[in-house]
């Protein structure tokens, strides 16, 4: 089953995610845990043009609805709290933001992207209530299960924290997504397989992969330029071959949301494949990955 089909089954019809920037930052950037952020981070790489934290959540959703107008008749929407760490605020503020989204006409659920160290029981109790009548997905930025890599890229959390967040979220009956990065510094194919095998043993339903991208102006770009850190110099075909191997490590009931990310080309130092997700999917299909 692909991701669109998974969502359609869960909400009973076609649904489109609308990304929202609710103006939150990240504990790894605002001094709560650290200042520099993860070495590879540049949120501009994945924030769509209609996301604007100066607008309210409802306004961003209305703008997103307008952006996608006409794609399907009778389209419904998921409010996708995507930017930075979308649970990094006090509970009252979070609840107000999520409730505002759920009150927008046509919004049938929430997708919330966050760090594993930014979920707690109060938040999950509330989301569990929402999940009784709407779809709620929590996407956790796990990235890898290897603590040495997490330290190297300055994630400021470890695997044990990810494991606890996955289990606590699932215990609340909420669909868990895991975000994983492939090609992190120092990781072999076997390391990536180990990550996916471990994730597959846990109550994770959705997996979102992307290739490590080195963005201009990031700490990682400086580390790579100076030779302090090496990243993979792989072709899209080589990356697809790794994805094929990883796919065989997933449970059959797991759904892959995506295998590859696409950032504005002007931001990317490497890899510069220039492939749209659909074109990458063709590579995967040639390797018999559905
Ligand atoms: S946790 Fe996410 S938003 Fe925060 S610095 Fe890392 S990649 Fe950026």
Image (spheres, helix red, strand yellow):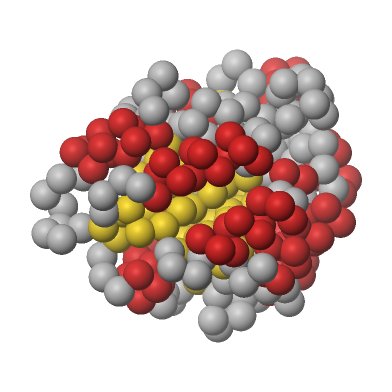
Q: Foreground residue, 223 or 17?
A: 17
Left or right position of 264 against 115: left
Left or right position of 127 against 81: right
Residue visible at 37% across and 53% down in the picture: 78
Q: Where is residue 220 in the image (x, y as percent from the top left)?
A: 69, 26
Can you tell which quarter of the image residue 199 is in?
bottom right
Q: Position of residue 15 (x, y in %)?
A: 29, 60
Residue visible at 56% across and 20% down in the picture: 216
Residue visible at 52% across and 34% down in the picture: 83
Can you tell which quarter of the image residue 57 is in?
top left
Q: Foreground residue, 49 or 146?
A: 49
Report the quarter where the C terminus lies.
bottom left
Q: Where is residue 264 in the image (x, y as percent from the top left)?
A: 40, 29
In the depicted structure, whether residue 147 falls above or below residue 52: below
Q: Foreground residue, 79 or 187?
A: 79
Q: Can see residue 182?
A: no
Q: Can see residue 71?
A: yes
Report the quarter where the N terminus lies.
bottom left
Residue visible at 67% across and 35% down in the picture: 90
Total marks shown come to: 0
Can you tell which quarter of the image residue 35 is in?
top right
Q: Where is residue 167 in the image (x, y as percent from the top left)?
A: 75, 67
Q: Foreground residue, 240 or 79?
A: 79
Residue located farthest toward the bottom when viewing the structure as drawn: 252
Left or right position of 185 against 104: right
In the depicted structure, whether residue 215 falls above or below residue 78: above
Left or right position of 276 against 117: left
């Amino acid at each position: 089953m692909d991701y669109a089909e998974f969502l359609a089954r869960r909400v009973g019809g076609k649904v489109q995610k609308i990304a929202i920037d609710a103006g939150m930052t990240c504990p790894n950037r605002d001094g709560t845990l650290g200042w520099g952020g993860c070495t590879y981070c540049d949120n501009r790489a994945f924030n769509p043009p209609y996301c604007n934290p100066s607008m309210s959540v409802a306004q961003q959703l209305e703008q997103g609805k307008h952006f996608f107008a006409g794609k399907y008749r009778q389209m419904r929407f998921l409010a996708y709290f995507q930017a930075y760490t979308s649970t990094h605020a006090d509970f009252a503020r979070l609840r107000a933001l999520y409730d505002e989204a759920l009150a927008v006409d046509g919004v049938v659920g929430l997708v919330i992207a966050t760090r594993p160290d930014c979920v707690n029981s109060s938040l999950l109790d509330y989301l569990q209530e929402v999940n009784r009548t709407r779809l709620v997905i929590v996407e956790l930025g796990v990235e890898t299960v290897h603590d040495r890599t997490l330290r190297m890229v300055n994630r400021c959390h470890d695997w044990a924290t990810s494991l606890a967040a996955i289990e606590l979220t699932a215990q609340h009956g909420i669909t868990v997504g895991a975000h994983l990065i492939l090609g992190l510094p120092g990781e072999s194919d076997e390391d990536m397989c180990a990550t996916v095998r471990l994730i597959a043993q846990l109550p994770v339903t959705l997996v979102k992969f992307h290739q490590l991208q080195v963005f201009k102006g990031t700490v990682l770009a400086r580390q790579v330029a100076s030779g302090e850190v090496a990243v993979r110099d792989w072709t899209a075909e080589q990356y697809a071959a790794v994805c094929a191997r990883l796919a065989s490590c997933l449970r059959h009931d797991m759904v892959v949301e995506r295998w590859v990310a696409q950032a504005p080309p002007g931001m990317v130092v490497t890899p510069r494949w220039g492939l749209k997700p659909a074109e990458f999917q063709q590579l995967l299909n040639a390797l018999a990955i559905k």
